[in-house]
Amino acid sequence: MKGTTKLLFLLLPVALIAFLLNRFDNRTAYSSDSVMEQLERFNEVFSYINRYYVEPPDREKIITGAIAGMLSELDPHSVYIPPQNMERVTEQFEGEFEGIGIEFVILNKILTIVSPIVGGPSEAVGLLPGDQIIKIEGQSTYGIKEEDVQKKLRGKKGTKVAITINRPGLSEQFDVTITRDKIPIYSVMASFLLEDGETGYIYLGRFARTTSQEIEDALKKLEAQGMKQLIFDLRGNSGGYLDQAFEVADKFIPGGYKIVYTKGRLDNSSQEFYSTNRNTHDMFPLIVLISHGSASASEIVSGAVQDLDRGLVLGQTSFGKGLVQNQIKLLDGGALRLTVARYYTPSGRLIQRPYEDDNIVDYYSDAYQDSAVVNKVDSTKSYLTFAGRTVFGGGGITPDSVLASDKITRFTNRLIIKRIFFEFGSKWASDHRTIYDSFETFQKKFNIDEKMIKDLQVIMEKHEIEFNQEAYDKDVDYIHLLMKAEVARHLWDSEHYYMVRVKGDSEIQHALNLMHEAERIKNLHAWNVRP
């Protein structure tokens, strides 16, 4: 993020507190609730716990808990990241790591590849979705823990690791040696044209360091293929870097318009971000999809599109995270992610949901309740878009068209959680790998039949899941869609999985029907379009 604030945040014994306080202006008069007195109070409690608790206390656990408790009194998004979690958290947003490049899952205690990462060394040696890694360097992986997979398969670029693969459908296992490399973590999960040949679809999973360039590449690819309008899917995107949100919005909005601004206690926390003409694309009709899980950077983009009348926002009211955090490295190797500002959309809306009266569980659970949509819209906090349309503040981005999210039964949800569809796709694809000459043929000719349902039931029985006919009948179209999508993933890759999924996505179909409205909205005012 821009404007990094350098702060030192420590909990120290009293002997060291005085040393720190002497670094401040010695003319400062401390009141009854001074820093010195409050830290002495903490140290007193900690000393009694350390000396008298019924058993020797875990000091590390106590201090970490105290830090977490202190931050919880500020807001729900200021957090402490312990040193042992830093690598995972950093990797999530930095956009790369070093290893063999696979998405994996532990399925029935077996290490199973969900998908080789495009451009990675595992893809280069021909590994496929559904392949089972049964040995690493000659040692069995049966029952392996996720953290041990990371330790064994990740490593410095150029180093090698030998693995043994069991591929469903092959009678014999085989060995392969993979040379580790830098592995990109992509933000764009899928980008392709829909079947009409003119509607582009981009699904963005997060806002990481490489997001802006990935979106640029996706847009150029789709435009070269003849894209005339775009569905930009931010559903479930929980956010990320503020500067990446600005740069993504900048691609859709001509230069000279305020995209977002922040306000904080310190001067360098208050900033304004205006669109440029550096990478702005053509003014094609644009629809942004959001959900209850769309937060932070997702709300910056959707809020700017809505407030500037650039396009249409569809879906459910977004999460409502309007707080900006800076990540500050600590001496223990961990980090403090501290809220330093609030952000506002172009019309002046603060997107942050109220949190003062909620405990942390209610704060998160309420955001995902459809019944909460009405409560979030505060008609007393109305704002006007650039063209004079009314939008509301009070928590999250309220879509221009609110869509009911698709509901599935507990039965189907359990099948998803237990990876039943994934396992079906792996087995079916292994048995029929050469049956289709192209994805287009697969799309047209692949249909779920009774034998496939029986195969699915066999997998369910192995997982001790009882078949529920009533739930199956209710979700039959969705169940068949997921079965077909998983087969596509195993025959091709994850992007083809999404190419199947969109066909049964009611919100995407709704977006297609409202493209004319997106066109109308973007023409409500004259844009300062580049020459």
Image: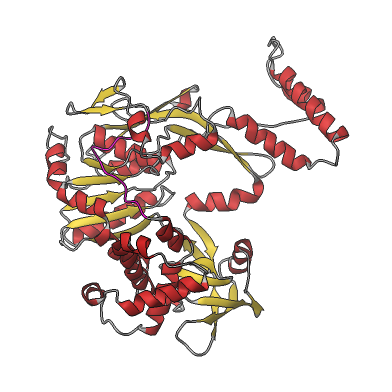
Q: How far across and down, in percent of the image, does residue 193 sit?
A: 22, 61
Which residue is farthest front? 470
Q: Is residue 507 left or right of residue 264?
A: left
Residue 280 visible in the displayed image: no
Q: Is residue 290 left or right of residue 517?
A: right
Point out the image quarter for the C terminus: top left
Task: Give the residues in magenta.
Answer: 395-408
Q: Quadrant of residue 306?
A: top left
Residue 202 lies within the magenta run: no
Which of these two is toward me, 109 or 474?
A: 474
Residue 271 visible in the displayed image: yes
Q: How far across and down, in percent of the image, does residue 439 sit?
A: 26, 74
Residue drawn at (30%, 53%) of the image? 216
Q: In which quarter of the image is residue 33?
A: top right
Q: In this view, does 266 lie to the left or right of 142?
A: left
Q: Main secondary structure of the magenta part?
A: loop
**Tag count:** 0
Q: Is residue 308 above or below residue 437?
A: above
Q: How far across and down, in percent of the image, does residue 198 sit?
A: 15, 58
Residue 405 lies within the magenta run: yes
Residue drawn at (32%, 85%) of the image? 434
